[in-house]
Amino acid sequence: MLESEKVEFKIRLQYDNLTQIKFFKAIVRGYLEKDEDLYNFINKFKKENVIQSKEQRKKIMTNIKQATDIKSKFALDDNEIENIFDILEQEHPDL
């Protein structure tokens, strides 16, 4: 990273009232939670930098979209899914 980019980065963080830690935590969280906007950006970055083939990028984006659609369809978050497994375990301890 060039020195001028570091300075510009720090200025942008100040403008957005973010620390470097908050910024990176937000990016990591978005990446792990498969945030659609972040994944679109990363997909664009991979395309511009020839990091994966077009087929690989398309397959990844399709999988993410399908997972998001399924979560939306059933309207389940991680806590609800965990609760379902707890209930099943209580009712069927032999499983």
Image: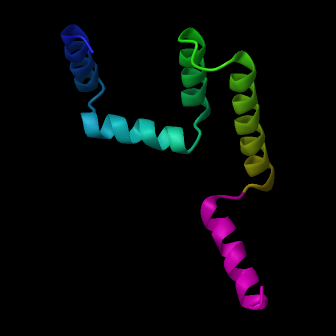
Q: Quadrant of the C terminus?
A: bottom right
What residue range appears in magenta?
76-95
Q: Residue at x 19, y 15 (%)?
A: 7
Depicted 47 relative to depicted 40: above or below:
above
Quadrant in the picture for residue 28: top left
Q: Residue at x 70, y 75 (%)?
A: 85
Depicted 66 relative to depicted 90: above or below:
above
Q: Residue at x 57, y 18 (%)?
A: 51
75 or 45, nearer to the observer: 45
Where is residue 48? Give x, y as percent.
Answer: 56, 9
Quadrant in the picture for residue 35: top right
Where is residue 8? Give x, y as percent.
Answer: 24, 13
Number of marks drawn: 0
Give the color scheme: rainbow, by chain, secondary structure or one colour: rainbow
Question: Relative to residue 57, is residue 5 drawn left or right?
Answer: left
Question: Relative to residue 32, is residue 69 drawn left or right?
Answer: right
Where is residue 14? Give x, y as percent.
Answer: 22, 25
Question: Relative to residue 61, is residue 16 drawn left or right?
Answer: left
Residue 91 is one of the magenta-drawn residues: yes
Question: Relative to residue 77, is residue 2 drawn left or right?
Answer: left
17 or 45, nearer to the observer: 45
Magenta: main secondary structure: helix
Residue 17 is one of the magenta-drawn residues: no
Q: Residue at x 46, y 43 (%)?
A: 29
Where is residue 3? Give x, y as percent.
Answer: 18, 11
Q: Quadrant of the N terminus?
A: top left
Quadrant in the picture for residue 27: top left
